Image (tube, rainbow, N blue to C red):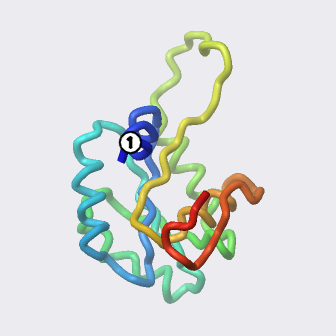
């Protein structure tokens, strides 16, 4: 819980990852409800859309209240450019002020267990930054 809170508090944009194969599950709704209170932009991403048919099954995620979900496949590296565009569009406007010291993109990746967050992070980073396993709760 503490790590989740710190990640969300320090993020400029939150990427909410759901699993298109499973559809909306109760924990997705809990995460969506929690994110409504943070006052930060949220980009809804429906991961594991490895085929066109799966990519067309994102409609039910509209009910989470974050607009049109972006269908991606971290494993197949589909939708990456569109995701970066959505994140860039959600970032706060440039104030023209010089950035403080070191500048780093602060992004929170949230979602229930085993929706593909680790694979998603590795795909974005283009490196094996996070251990990926089919067993829930093994991310390091």
Q: Which residue is mark 1?
A: 2
Residue at 51 percent across and 50 percent down: it is: 86
Task: Give neighbour class at mark 1: few <14, some 14-19, many 20+ (Cα, 10 Å).
Answer: few
Q: Can you say whether 84 is above or below 56 in the image?
A: above
| The C terminus sits in image quarter | bottom right
Q: Residue 66 vs residue 4: left or right?
A: left
Residue at 39 percent across and 66 percent down: it is: 112
Farthest-out residue, right: 127
Q: Residue 24 vs residue 71: left or right?
A: left
Residue at 44 percent across and 84 percent down: it is: 21
Query: Horizontal and vertical percent for residue 80?
Result: 63, 60
Q: Answer with the quarter of the image where residue 51 lies.
A: bottom right
In this rendered view, identify the residue nearer to me: 122 or 95: 122
Using the rendered image of the protein, determine whether residue 126 is visible from the camera's viewpoint.
yes
Q: Residue 50 vs residue 57: left or right?
A: right
In this rendered view, identify the residue nearer to me: 60 or 115: 115
Q: Can you say whether 40 is above or below 29 in the image?
A: above
Q: Can you say whether 17 is above or below 85 in the image?
A: below
Q: Can you say whether 130 is above or below 89 in the image?
A: below
Q: Residue 23 vs residue 74: left or right?
A: left
Indicate the secondary structure of the residue bearing disc 1. helix
Farthest-out residue, bottom: 53
Using the rendered image of the protein, determine whether residue 41 is visible from the camera's viewpoint.
no
Q: Answer with the quarter of the image where residue 128 lies.
A: bottom right
Query: Horizontal and vertical percent for residue 20?
Result: 44, 78
Q: How many marks?
A: 1
Query: Horizontal and vertical percent for residue 73?
Result: 59, 73
Residue at 67 percent across and 63 percent down: it is: 131
């Amino acid at each position: 819980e503490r790590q989740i809170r710190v990640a969300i508090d320090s993020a400029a944009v939150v990427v909410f990852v759901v699993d298109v194969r499973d559809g909306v599950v109760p924990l997705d709704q809990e995460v969506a409800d929690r994110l409504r209170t943070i006052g930060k932009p949220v980009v809804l991403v429906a991961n594991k859309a490895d085929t066109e048919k799966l990519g067309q099954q994102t409609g039910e995620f509209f009910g989470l209240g974050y607009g049109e979900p972006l269908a991606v496949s971290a494993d197949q590296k589909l939708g990456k450019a569109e995701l970066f565009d959505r994140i860039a569009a959600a970032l706060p406007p440039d104030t023209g002020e010089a950035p403080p010291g070191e500048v780093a993109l602060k992004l929170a990746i949230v979602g229930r267990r085993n929706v593909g967050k680790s694979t998603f992070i590795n795909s974005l980073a283009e490196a094996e930054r996070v251990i990926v396993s089919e067993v829930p709760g093994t991310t390091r």
